[in-house]
Image (tube, helix red, strand yellow):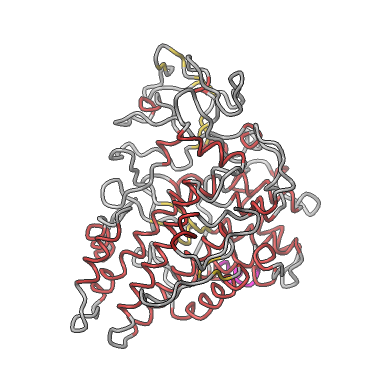
Amino acid sequence: MKLTKNKLYIALLSGLTLLSTGCFKFDDEVYSAYTEETFPKTPEQFVAVTGPVYTSARGYFADYFDLQTAGADEVVIPTRGGDWFDGGKWRDMHFHTWSSSHEVVRNAWNWGFSAIGTCNRVLSVIEKSEDSEQKDQTIAEIKTMRAWYYYLMMDAYGNLPLVTTFDTGTELPTTTPRAQIFDFIVSELEENLPLLSEDKSLQTYGRPTKWFAHALLAKAYLNAQVYTSTPNWNKVVEHANKIIESQKFALETDYLAQFKPDNGADSPEPIFSIPFDASRATGNALFFKVLHYAHRQTFDLNGNPWNGWSAQPAYFHLFEDEDIRKQQWLYGQQYTSSGQPLVYNGVNIVLNPDGFVLLPGSDFDIGGADDGGRLAGARCVKYYPDKNHIGSNAGNDVVVFRLADVLLMKAEAILRGATNGTTAEALDAANIVRKRAFPNNPEKHFTAATLTLEALYKERALEFTFEVTRRTDMIRFGKWEDAMLFKPANTAETYKRIFPIPATALANNPNLSQNTGYN
């Protein structure tokens, strides 16, 4: 991440990085600094009191990323001998055999509702401060972030407790149906959107703007049929057009530049990103998850990666050699940073995208005594390894919303029946993305005949690997129950389109109801 001259932003990073997984102690310190006599008044004070809302967002690329990604068709995290068994949790995610006591299910829930609670607590402080434009905008920003957290939880768990105040003395909440959670999210975004900034700059980087709200509304409406049984394709186009017509965003010429370790506010494409820094805003460890141990020599790292997450063969083979997005994958012969063939433990490191061979008697172990299983699978380096990492922490900011997604959402909504857009507009929007991927071959661009929903589903796979969209896309396109590597189709288990409410949450709050199909 680039840290340039935004003094407030730097102050936020340096002053609030104690908030990571152990956030509660730090929250107490932040809030205890503000009494009725010293509520926030200056911009610096508002930054200080709202900081935990934004540092909480880093869990999006940890526990929530694991929940949304590990069961989708873009990745497999097999057991490699003694590596990556982890109590069988990745096997359960891959085979869709999770339960209400599953670690990943529980951790993502705890992260999301901790973040929502932090928003409510921040609001309880800010709402008592003196009236001002700064106060109104800050409240709108925090409510917009809370709507985003609720959206993430609704997408994953469906029916949720809806809590909008910070009052520990109230009765424990009951479960609110998913459709009502959807309505709450939409109303919160629409109500607060006019108070958000229109600026796209370092000053607003990492904070919700009007364009963030429009992108989230487009995303919510794109999946409205899943969430509420009632589609609203026109709303997708309406909000996508607000972003497109603003002319504040453009596709990054170099597709991978927006994900590099020095990415930041300078990129024209991202609408909202989560700032990370190897020392002051930690938690981006994706490159350590995917790289082979020996890639330490490829990327001049100061530690060995963990050799885990890799592409399922069918997903990897969606990428044509001519597609520039294939550059995000490592496969075949690997090399050191000086260009020599990479060798590890006496084994030539050749990554085989199709090398998933199960050990006898196993349904998920591809390891064994030799390194064969440890070389299976192409590895995604979309978020390019940061040679300045500290431990497993990289400095790449994580992109949540970007223009390419907005364009493809618009195209899909029109193909699905939106009446406020034409097929020509859908074709133009989709081809803006497609032409970047195939800049030198017009034959690969979409035509009116080739731009189908199935083509858009594939295009979203090619464009958004590891961007926390695939599970939601698979469900919307009716693919979630399909067979995958090692996993048979589970067409009778449509209830698994949402995860169970964790057993710990049910134990702590007997007013909650478990999702249908789960014990």
Give 303 or 503, whichever is nearer the viewer: 503
Give 468 or 239, whichever is nearer the viewer: 468
Q: What stretch is highlighted in magenta?
A: 237-245
Quadrant of the rendered image containing residue 130: bottom left
Q: Quick check: is 512 in the magenta stretch? A: no
Residue at the spot x=57%, y=64% of the render? 513
Q: Is residue 215 above or below residue 458?
A: below
> In the rendered view, does 470 fall on the left or right side of 271?
right
Can residue 254 be seen in this snapshot?
no
Can residue 169 be seen in this snapshot?
yes
Q: Quick check: is 238 in the magenta stretch? A: yes
Q: Is residue 85 above or below residue 169?
A: above
* Residue 400, percent from left and from top: 48, 56
* Residue 458, percent from left and from top: 68, 46
* Residue 165, percent from left and from top: 40, 77
Give 268 or 13, whichever is nearer the viewer: 13
* Residue 254, percent from left and from top: 50, 46
> In the rendered view, does 454 fall on the left or right side of 110?
right
Residue at the spot x=56%, y=74% of the render? 186
Q: Main secondary structure of the magenta part?
A: helix
Instruction: Point out the residue furthest to the bottom here.
Output: 131
